[in-house]
Amino acid sequence: MAMARDFWVNSGFSLLERDAHGWLVPTDAYLAGLLAWPELALAPESCAAEKALHGALQQAPRRAVSDAELDALADADIRENYRVFLRFRDGVLAAGSLEGYYLHIMRGGAVNVPGVFVDAVVQAILRSVLEHCDDAFEARAAEMLFRPQRITQHDGQMLAGDRATLDMLQETAGLGEVGRLLRESGALQPTAELRVLSPANAPDYWQASGRHHFLLDMAHEVSQDLSHGLTLKLTRARSGLKALSRVLEQWVAHMLGVQVEIEPVRQITDSAWRWHVGLDVASTAILNDLYEDRAVDADRMARLISLFTLRFANPAEMRADVAGKPVYLGLATGSDGVVRIKPQNLLLNLPLAAAA
């Protein structure tokens, strides 16, 4: 077994415990840690009531909070932030685990907290799944499940970059508010180093700082021109799509207890295509149109990053009418060039047998 690495230190994973099923159980330390989020942390202008409530919850994160305590908070936005925190806290405690909470809100269609809480849950779960991961490509690919990625074509590479990081560097060159002011004055150009993850620099990924500065090459094949007009297509062993496939396999196994094998493919040629799942809103719409034999224009098709085949290790865990048949997956960007993976899609839309 690979040695556990300390990465994604902001995931809250170290403050969680595991139950007998291997799922993450919230602790007082984990709940209290949420109070350090910018939306809940105390500020110089915090009123006395906010300071009292914040201190009380730090000491007893599971304590009941009355409407009177919330109404006493002077700032309406702060009141709403605490209500959201309490909804999340109570939901997680009622579910008993982060995994149980995630499945509950997704299956029930009742997501009553902002996306930042959902992304934090996904990050913590993936951190647990990848606890003994020693593959930087898989860890970087896993970030795609909770951090939107901007896709750029460059010299035959399809590069996925962390959207928030790229936007920040574009605005401030990584120098914060000072950098923003200098950039607005025209005195500064972005200088922060962005690196494409490679076997040579992969050890650097595990460092605590600058992790989101790594770009992930999603190109799965490379072409090599031969003589006599021949072209050789080679599958890249270290592609981001391959790493993403391995992460999705582990995600399904951990959350559903089902073993699957996922592989990137260039196209679907199956005349008996029976089932598909889009990993995001854009690819879902494209696959639906292709399945229904509706025309998809060139601009939308160009947004398709990849297709995948998903096969169940045990066909008996599938619905009887599709048992043994492949499930096709899609991954695409929106019109803004950003891919936003919805990891719940794999959990909600696979053709599982009722007993699976």
Image (cartoon, rainbow, N blue to C red):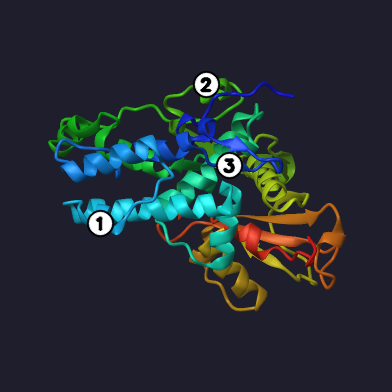
Which amino acid type is shown beneath numbered disc 3? Val
Marks 3 and 1 sit apart, C-alpha to C-alpha, by: 30 Å
Viewport quadrant of the N terminus: top right
Q: Secondary structure at mark 1?
A: helix
Is residue 226 among what the camera can see? yes
Q: Which residue is mark 2?
A: 204
Q: Nearer the viewer, residue 226 or 131?
A: 131
| Label 2, residues with CA under 10 Å away: few <14, some 14-19, many ≥20 | some
Q: Position of residue 341 (x, y in %)?
A: 53, 54
Would you identify the image quadrant in which residue 115 lies? bottom left
Residue 126 drawn above or below residue 346: above
Q: Residues within 10 Å of mark 1 (few under 14, many from 20)?
A: few
- Residue in the picture at 84% in, 52% down: 313
Indicate which label's residue lies in the foreground, 2 or 1. 1
The reply, left or right, for residue 85 in relation to residue 96 is left
In primary-sequence order, the first of circles 3 and 1 is 3
**In this image, 197 relative to 171: left or right?**
right
Residue 261 in the image: x percent, y percent?
A: 77, 49
Residue assigned mark 3 = 25
Q: Secondary structure under badge 2?
A: helix
Which residue carries the number 1 mark? 68
| Residue 179 screen position, x and y as percent | 21, 31
Question: Label 2 to label 3, Cα distance in Å?
Answer: 31 Å
Q: Is residue 27 above or below residue 338?
A: above
Label 2 or label 3, whichever lies nearer to me, is 3
Q: Seen in the image, is 235 located left or right of residue 325? A: left
- Say few, some or many: other residues with alpha carbon within 10 Å of mark 3 (under 14 / 14 to 19 / 20 or more): some
Of residues 355 and 198, the one nearer the viewer is 355
Q: Residue at left 37%, top 35%?
A: 59
